[in-house]
Image: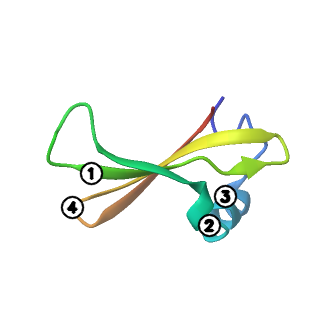
């Protein structure tokens, strides 16, 4: 499931990101396609369950990925 399928609109996604805590952090890793690009992975718990959230910055662009864990 993606963010939309989890019932999260844009404001909901922003609220999840703003509400991330240290305990939500899971790991840092490189992308599968490019070992020079790092991403932080979080596993916050929502009302609908736990999600897997990746935050990546590529060329000054923030990319956020939501999916069901």
Closer to the camera in the image, 14 or 21: 21
Disc number lying in front (3 or 2): 2
The x and y percentages for residue 22 are: 57, 65
Badge number at residue 21:
2
Q: Residue drawn at (26%, 31%), measured in percent from left and top?
A: 32
Q: Is residue 7 left or right of residue 23?
A: right
- The residue singled out by tag 1 in the image is 38
Name the image quarter holding the C terminus. Answer: top right
For the residues labelled 4 and 1, the Cα–Cα distance comes to 12 Å
Question: Which label sits in the foreground, 2 or 4?
Answer: 2
Crowding at mark 3 (Cα within 10 Å: few <14, some 14-19, many 20+):
few
Q: Residue furthest right?
A: 47
Q: Earlier in the sequence, mark 3 or mark 2?
A: 3
Which element type, helix, strand or loop, lies under badge 3? helix
* Other-residue count near label 4 (Cα within 10 Å), few / some / many at <14 / 14–19 / ≥20: few
**Which callout, 3 or 1, points to the residue nearer the camera?**
1
Mark seen at residue 10: 3
On the rendered image, what quadrant is the N terminus found in? top right
Label 1 environment density (alpha carbons within 10 Å; few <14, some 14–19, many ≥20): some
Which numbered disc, 3 or 1, marks the residue that appears first in the sequence? Answer: 3
CA distance for labels 3 and 2:
20 Å
Near mark 2 (Cα within 10 A), the count class, few <14, some 14-19 or many ≥20, is few
Q: Secondary structure at mark 4?
A: loop
Q: Please report the residue visible at 26 percent of the width from the left and 67 percent of the height from the top.
A: 60
In the rendered image, residue 7, in percent from the top left (x then y), is placed at 79, 43
Q: Which residue is mark 4?
A: 59
- CA separation in Å, label 2 and label 1: 19 Å
Could you tell me how far apart the alpha carbons at marks 2 and 4 are, in whole angstroms? 25 Å
Indicate the quadrant where residue 14 lies. Answer: bottom right
Residue with the most extreme front position: 23
């Amino acid at each position: 499931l993606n963010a939309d399928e989890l019932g999260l609109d844009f404001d909901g996604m922003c609220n999840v990101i703003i509400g991330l805590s240290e305990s939500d952090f899971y790991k840092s890793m490189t992308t599968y396609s490019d070992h020079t690009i790092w991403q932080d992975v979080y596993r916050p718990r929502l009302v609908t369950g736990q999600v897997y959230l990746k935050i990546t910055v590529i060329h000054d662009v923030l990319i956020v990925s939501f999916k069901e864990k």
